[in-house]
Image (tube, grey):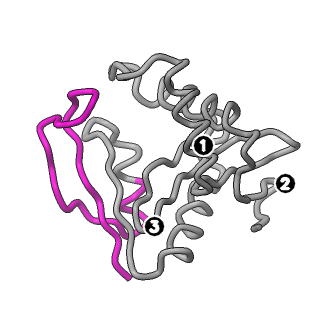
Amino acid sequence: MTAGPATVTLRPATAAEGPAVAEVYLRAYDAALPTVRRAHTDDEVRDFFRHVVERGTTWVAEEAGAVVGMMVLDGTELSQLHLAPDRRGRGIGDRFVALAKERSPSGLSLWTFQVNAPARRFYERHGFTADRWTDGDNEEGVPDVRYVWRP
C-alpha cells in the first residue's frame, strides 16, 4: 500500500471492486475520448473488469472509501490506467506510474490512442517513448501508439 497526497491510497483491488473499477474506466474513457466510439457496451466493460480484477493484476486509488482511479499492470504491460475525471491533475496518475515502475523495474510498455494527446504527454513526461504506431488495428479501429519505458 502506498499513501500520498490528501487521503488517496493505492492498493491492490479486491474481487468485489470490479464494478467500481469498471465505472472509473467508463467515466474516464468517455471524458477523455468523447469522439472515439467504445468497442464494447457498458455491460461488456463491467463483465471484462470483473474478470480482470479477479486475476489480481489491478490496483485502485481509494479516497474516502471510494475507488477514484485504477491501473492494470500485467507483468511489464501497463494495460490500463484511468482516473475519475474530477481526480485528474492531483498526482494520482504519477503515483500509479511510479508504482508500475517499482513493480516492473526492467521496463514497461503500453498502448494509447494517437488522438489522446493528454495521455501521450503524461507518459512522455514519465520517460516513456513512442515505439510503434498503428493505423487502427484495434477493436475501436482508431490509430494508436505503443510506448515503452526502459530504466
Q: Residue at x 47, y 60 (%)?
A: 74
Distance CA(mark 1)–CA(mark 2): 15 Å
**Mark 2 surroundings: few (<14), some (14-19) or many (≥20) residues within 10 A:** few
Q: Earlier in the sequence, mark 1 or mark 2?
A: 2
Quadrant of residue 37 in the image? top left
Q: Is residue 86 left or right of residue 138?
A: right
Residue on which disc 2 sits: 7
Which residue is nearer to you in this view: 103 or 149?
Answer: 103
Residue on which disc 3 sits: 75
User: Amino acid under label 3?
Assistant: Gly
Q: Is residue 136 left or right of residue 74?
A: left
Report x, y in % for residue 33. Answer: 40, 27
Element under label 1? Answer: loop
User: Amino acid under label 2?
Assistant: Thr
Residue on which disc 1 sits: 88
User: Amino acid under label 1?
Assistant: Arg
Q: Is residue 18 left or right of residue 104?
A: right
Quadrant of residue 66 in the image? top right
**Magenta-colored span:** 122-151
Q: Reply above or below: 142 against 125.
A: above
Report x, y in % for residue 147. Answer: 29, 59
Report x, y in % for residue 57. Answer: 57, 57
Q: Nearer the viewer, mark 1 or mark 3?
A: 3
